[in-house]
Every structure is written in structure tokens, then in C-alpha cells.
Image (cartoon, rainbow, N blue to C red):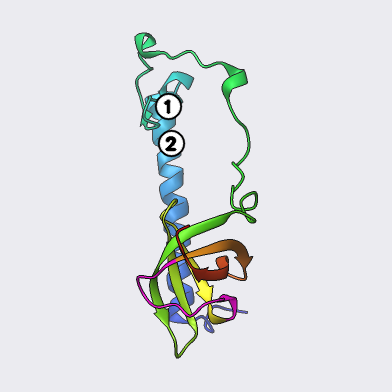
């Protein structure tokens, strides 16, 4: 079966592969003729104190001593789970009565917390100071038991 059925694209792909193979072969021959071999020292890369790759070794005077026991492994746990029963204070930054949801800015952590109308104990408006508890919602932290803050 001949190549008469080949399309232009197939010919182009075949020609490119052939050219690439020839170029590789030429580079290989050229490397053999020059006789230079790359050494292991040429392949080494160093990391500086800022985490960037460098071809020069690090300065021994900038060396820091790190104690292995002081290194913490793993991710830090979120403290919100421990503070779930803790009553917080915040300001209502946005509340849409028609849609029934809004956001409260926690005064302590400055975190924006979602609040739904079902979790309101008192009617709230924007810029009201409220007390609430933080619970886990489907998309993140949610304010629960939201009521207007009354100073005692």
C-alpha cells in the first residue's frame, strides 16, 4: 500500500518527525566530535536564602542553625471549632431583607461571617451591633443565634 492516500497534514507530521530525528542525530555527532562531557558540577543548582535557584553555592557566613525539635509538621488547626460555643460580637455590614441573608464583620477577628434570616433571633439592619455564635455552614462559617447586642 503506497502513500498516495496520505493527506497534507499527515505528510507534514511525518516530515517534522523526520527533521527532528535528523537534528537530534546531528547534535549527537557534534557532541562526540567536540568531546566535551558535562560534569556533575555543571548540573548542580543551589537554593539561596530566599528560595531562588542559583548556580553559586551559598555563603557559609549566612548559615542559620535550625533545631529540628522546633519545626512543626502538619497544618495548623482552625480555632473556630474550639470557639463554636463562644459568643462573639460583630457589626452587620450587609443585610438584604427580601432575600433573607447578609454578612456580619466580627469585631475581634475582622472576619466576614454569613448570616441567614433563619438564624436571627431579633430583626437586624445594617450597622447594628449584634452578638452571635459561629457555626459551620455549607460554604463556610455561618452566624447562629444572632441577636442585637445590649450592653449590661
Q: Is residue 126 magenta?
A: yes
**Residue at image location 44% in from the left, 14% down from the top:** 64
Residue 113, given in percent of the width and then of the height, sits at 49, 65
- Closer to the camera in the image, 92 or 30: 92
Query: Between 114 and 38, which is closer to the camera in this rendering?
Result: 114
Mark 1 vs 2: CB contact within 8 A: no
Of residues 65 and 136, the one nearer the viewer is 136
State which region is magenta.
118-129
Residue placed furthest toward the bottom: 98
Residue 112 place in picture, x, y as percent: 44, 63
Q: Position of residue 2 (x, y in %)?
A: 58, 78
Residue wearing tag 1 = 45
Residue 92 included in the magenta stretch of the image = no
Q: Residues within 10 Å of mark 1 (few under 14, many from 20)?
A: few
Q: Which mark is residue 29?
A: 2
Q: Main secondary structure of the magenta part?
A: loop
Amino acid at each position: 500500500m503506497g502513500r498516495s492516500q496520505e493527506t497534507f497534514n499527515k505528510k507534514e507530521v511525518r516530515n517534522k518527525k523526520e527533521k527532528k530525528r535528523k537534528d537530534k542525530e546531528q547534535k549527537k555527532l557534534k557532541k562526540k566530535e567536540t568531546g566535551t562531557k558535562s560534569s556533575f558540577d555543571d548540573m548542580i543548582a543551589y537554593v539561596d536564602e530566599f528560595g531562588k535557584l542559583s548556580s553559586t553555592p551559598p555563603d557559609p557566613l549566612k548559615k542559620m542553625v535550625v533545631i529540628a525539635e522546633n519545626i512543626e509538621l502538619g497544618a495548623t488547626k482552625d480555632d473556630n471549632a474550639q470557639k463554636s460555643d463562644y459568643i462573639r460580637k460583630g457589626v452587620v455590614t450587609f443585610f438584604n431583607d427580601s432575600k433573607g441573608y447578609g454578612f456580619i464583620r466580627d469585631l475581634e477577628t475582622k472576619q466576614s461571617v454569613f448570616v441567614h434570616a433563619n438564624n436571627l433571633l431579633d430583626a437586624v439592619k445594617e450597622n447594628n451591633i449584634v452578638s452571635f455564635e459561629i457555626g459551620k455552614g455549607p460554604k463556610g462559617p455561618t452566624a447562629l443565634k444572632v441577636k442585637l447586642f445590649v450592653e449590661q
